[in-house]
Amino acid sequence: MAMISKIRKQGWLIVAIIGIAMLGFLFPYQAVFALLNMGSGEIGSIGGEVVGQKEWSEAVERQKILFNYSGNEASLSNDTWNNLVESRLMSTTYDRLGLLVTEEEWDEIVFGEMLSPYVKSTIYNGQDSAALKEQMRLNFDGMDSRMYTGWKNLITLKRQREKFDVMVKKGLYANNIDGKWAFKQQNDKVEVDYVVKTYQEIPDSSVTWTEGDIRAYYNKHKKDKEYRQETSRSIEYIKFPVKPSAADSAMTKSSLTDLVAQFEAATGDSAFAAGYAATPGQSTRPYVIGSLPAEVEIQILTDTVGDVVGPFIEGASMKIAKISRRATEVDSVQARHILLKEKGPEGKAKADSLKKVILKSKNFAEMAAKYGTDGTKDSGGDLGMFGRGSMVPPFEKACFDGKVGEVQIVETNFGVHLVEVTKKNAPKPVTYITAIDKPLVPSGATRKAAYSQVNDFTILFPDTASFRAAADTLNGGTPRTPAENIRPNATNIPGLNDATEIITWIYSAELGDVSQPIRAGDDWVVAVLTAIRERGVPTLENVYDQMKQKVIQEKKAEKYAELMKTGTLQEIAAAVGSSVKKGSNITLRSANIPGSGVSGQEHALIGACFGIPTGNISTPIKGEGGVYVIQRTSEIVAGSSQDGYLTDRDNLARGLQSRAAMSVFNSFRENGDVEDNRYEPK
């Protein structure tokens, strides 16, 4: 809508576009853009250095050849940008610290015994075996030079980061004094009597404020860290679900009905189903009691073998199901296994050796605990009871065809298993069915009609006020879903499966614009841009509501602090319509006084509980959730450590180390003058 409006107002733009298009027939498009000085804008800056269009395009191409993004341009852009930021901000620091990666080390962390964590998770998908490493070496040897260089540079950068993170962690520790104070903060306790008047219970109408008060508060606090904002946009959107019509469902039913006679006559049920089913891999399988509606299940269990049941609806599909055969067989077994790390001939040889030991010593559980590599090793390899279809085919066949107590060697895509069936249920009657499914989806005509309805909506209601009013009456009231503070590098919006196109629109629209119909999954979406925020100091408009509440809170605090200045606790409570309460087991780690009616952090209040002399009444404390007056009723009761604060020291050190590396990197990023302009209109 915004673009159409602009084109209507600026006829010269159409002429320019046509002219550029004509130039495109005569010259390569790169030359046209160069002639018009287009495509050379700044993508952003890192560490004060500009990232130009040429550098950015080259970086994207380098990233693109390493990973399969399958058209996910947002992820490609984000990964490229994050790697550029890390390289620009950290490489100098890595060099100064001497964090080099030699050729020998690079070979070791990619193909050797000491895999880099990044390499293991990214390239090996968490797996680790000699065969995989050998295959990966062959893959790298066969790469073209651009891809090989790209991987080498990226892995080197990530390895330097791993070394840096370890250095930061190892450089942090806690001593015995730190441990002592960590313990005391958690275990020293006091008790107080107190009066509180929470801001929530004070009506806003009981205080007065002006627009000037809000502007003064804004001018004083606009640069505070809590108000600093990043580039973002906010929208409201409504969904127009596109559902199959009655005619669409009838057409799907007809197509399945036409198959019934052929399906009944078919001799290869699975092969026939595979040729017509929407879901690939349809095969004959045991029917699970209770999985279909009662009227369908009765037919499946009582009709003649060879009959076809349906069409019937299951979930988002319509189906027909052929009764392929009936049998009496075991429907569930219990087994235990040992999954070996080694695969192929090496794994089978090891499994054979273990099998001999198990058959001789009857120690399956012990061997599972020692050699198993999955989560069952701690329970002797026990898999519990499971039914048909629960395991991969080779494993399932071994379990259901094997005898109880028999130890078998089975190879699957997970590795080599030693398997022992420990229990089998008694055989039961089983009905096998083969299904053909067709999705219940809107036809082209239905989608076209839906689009027409949505498009009419955007034309009739092109601004925020009319958009909201229309949504509130559409179909008896259509919910307007807010989505706040959407960052430029976002890849999704809550409530929407595919938000890429909407996010692109958001960063090209103007405040108050209503979008054209945008496809999101199977739905149409219409959005209105409700807020624009740019990085840095916020505008008053963007923080008006927050600051208004702060001003009102300050007015309440001033009013009630004056009312609570003098008197006993009982007198102060009477003056403000409250009561005297008791606070027990308060520690320096307490966020607030339990039972006060305030859930937020009250650091000044907790500090006062420990700082005020016993028996004294405090001056009014203007907290985050209310105004307090306290009287400490006991001396500080010190906790008693059982190990001289060693546990607290070690816990404190671990906590510091777990947060340190990311905190240091974030500080580089926050103070590195990073400007991300990728999504700003050029």
Image (cartoon, rainbow, N blue to C red):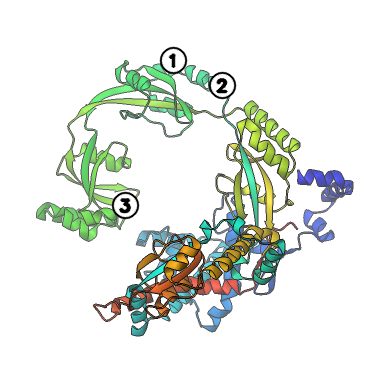
**Alpha carbons under labels 3 and 2: distance apart:** 49 Å
**Quarter holding the C terminus?**
bottom right
Residue assigned mark 2: 246
Is 598 positioned to the left or the right of 654 in the image? right
Q: Residue 647 in the image: x percent, y percent?
A: 29, 76
Secondary structure beneath dot 1 equals helix
User: Above or below — where is 622 with respect to 231?
Assistant: below
* Residue 162 in sight from this viewpoint: no
**Quarter holding the N terminus?**
top right
Label 1: how many Cα within 10 Å (few below 14, some 14–19, many 20+): few
Label 3: how many Cα within 10 Å (few below 14, some 14–19, many 20+): some
- The residue at the point 71 percent across, 61 percent down is 211
In the depicted view, which residue is nearer to us: 189 or 264?
A: 189
Q: Residue 39 in the image: x percent, y percent?
A: 76, 59
Residue assigned mark 3: 415
In the depicted view, which residue is nearer to us: 31 or 558?
A: 558
User: Above or below — where is 298 with respect to 612?
Assistant: above
Residue assigned mark 1: 261
Question: Quick one: label 3 or label 2, which is nearer the N terminus?
Answer: 2
Q: Are marks 1 and 3 in contact (CB under 8 Å)?
A: no
Question: Quick one: label 1 or label 2, which is nearer the N terminus?
Answer: 2
Q: Residue 364 in the image: x percent, y percent?
A: 16, 53
**Alpha carbons under labels 1 and 2: distance apart:** 24 Å
Q: Nearer the viewer, mark 3 or mark 2?
A: 2
Question: Quick one: label 1 or label 3, which is nearer the N terminus?
Answer: 1
User: Above or below — where is 327 with respect to 593?
Assistant: above
Residue type at mark 1? Ala
Secondary structure beneath dot 3 equals strand
Label 2: how many Cα within 10 Å (few below 14, some 14–19, many 20+): few
